[in-house]
Image (cartoon, coloured by chain):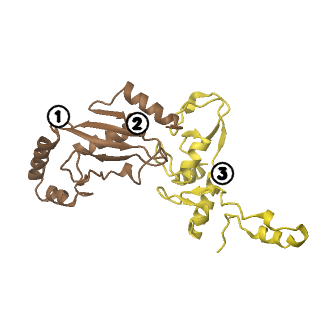
Chain colours: A yellow, B brown
Amino acid sequence: MGNCFKTPSTDDISLLRGNESQEGSDQSLGPPPPYQERVPVFHPSPNVSRPANQLSEEEQIKIAKRLGLISHLPSGVYDGSSKKGKECAICMCDFVLGEGLRFLPCMHTYHKTCIDDWLMRSFTCPSCMEPVDAALLTTYETN
Amino acid sequence: MAGLPRRIIKETQRLMAEPVPGISASPDESNARYFHVLVQGPKDSPYEGGMFKLELFLPEEYPMSAPKVRFMTKIYHPNIDKLGRICLDILKDKWSPALQIRTVLLSIQALLSAPNPDDPLANDVAEKWKVDEKAAIEEARNWTRKYASAQ
């Protein structure tokens, strides 16, 4: 199965072992370090949390598609214009000049990091519950 | 408690500064994510005159996932089971991070005013509600008097 999420393997260590005779003692190498790399956690559906290396192929496709859709949503930087509201409804903090924002098709605005985290779980606007892809389609149709 | 998110601090402050009528929520002394909640039985409902104790917990993922809420006081309601678990869409699949402790508790108060026996959690209660609503409401009143009378 095509797993796009790369997991560390121990192959490179075994390759190193091939040179042991030249390097001398293999004791210096010691046991491999304990597995410590942090695997990113995804949420294929709300309430489901799974490390990247335990996702089914179907879930990987869903997540990849979702990442693609999110990257197409307009984003920008807070320039102090207050007409779009000044507080992020997710973290309840005020927007600060220069912070990254994401603009949803329903015209609601959030911190980019806050809303992207949510959109990976549910593709809906937290404030109006409008499905983001449906809103995207109607935006395209009216244009 | 290391790293309590700003949002939780803000919500707690706002809850204290502008409490919701008929609802009180205060954080536990030793755990800022655990709230002791009191909800007054709404007027013109079989729960009127009752004071219901609930517990509310904000999980690690909050606000990306919903608070966990449970009735501690026994209550006769088609959408609340014996263990106090609540069948409410916004606590499950309809959760949104724009909702807050305040809105969750208001929704629970509204659920007391408008029981929904067609989407039951406590099956026997819902059955009773559908077969003989008058008797069910009377039973809810009895339970309120018996278990939820303020002092």
Q: Residues within 10 Å of mark 1 (few under 14, many from 20)?
A: few
Foreground mark, 2 or 1?
2
- Image check: B3 left or right of B16? right
Amino acid type for the residue under numbered disc 1: Ala
Foreground mark, 2 or 3?
2
On the rendered image, what quadrant is the C terminus of chain B found in?
top left
Residue sitting nearer the eye, B58 or A71 = B58
Chain letter of disc 2? B
Residue sitting nearer the eye, A95 or A106 = A95
Q: Do callouts 2 and 1 mark residues in contact (Cβ within 8 Å)?
A: no
Q: Is residue A3 above or below residue B27?
A: below
Residue found at x 54% / y 40%? A108
Q: Alpha carbon of mark 2 to alpha carbon of mark 3: how far?
A: 41 Å
Q: Which mark is residue B30?
A: 2
Which residue in the structure is indicated by mark 3? A71
Q: Are marks 3 and 1 on the same chain?
A: no
Chain letter of disc 1? B
Amino acid type for the residue under numbered disc 3: Ser
Element on which disc 3 rests? helix
The spot of residue A103 in percent (x, y) is: 60, 42
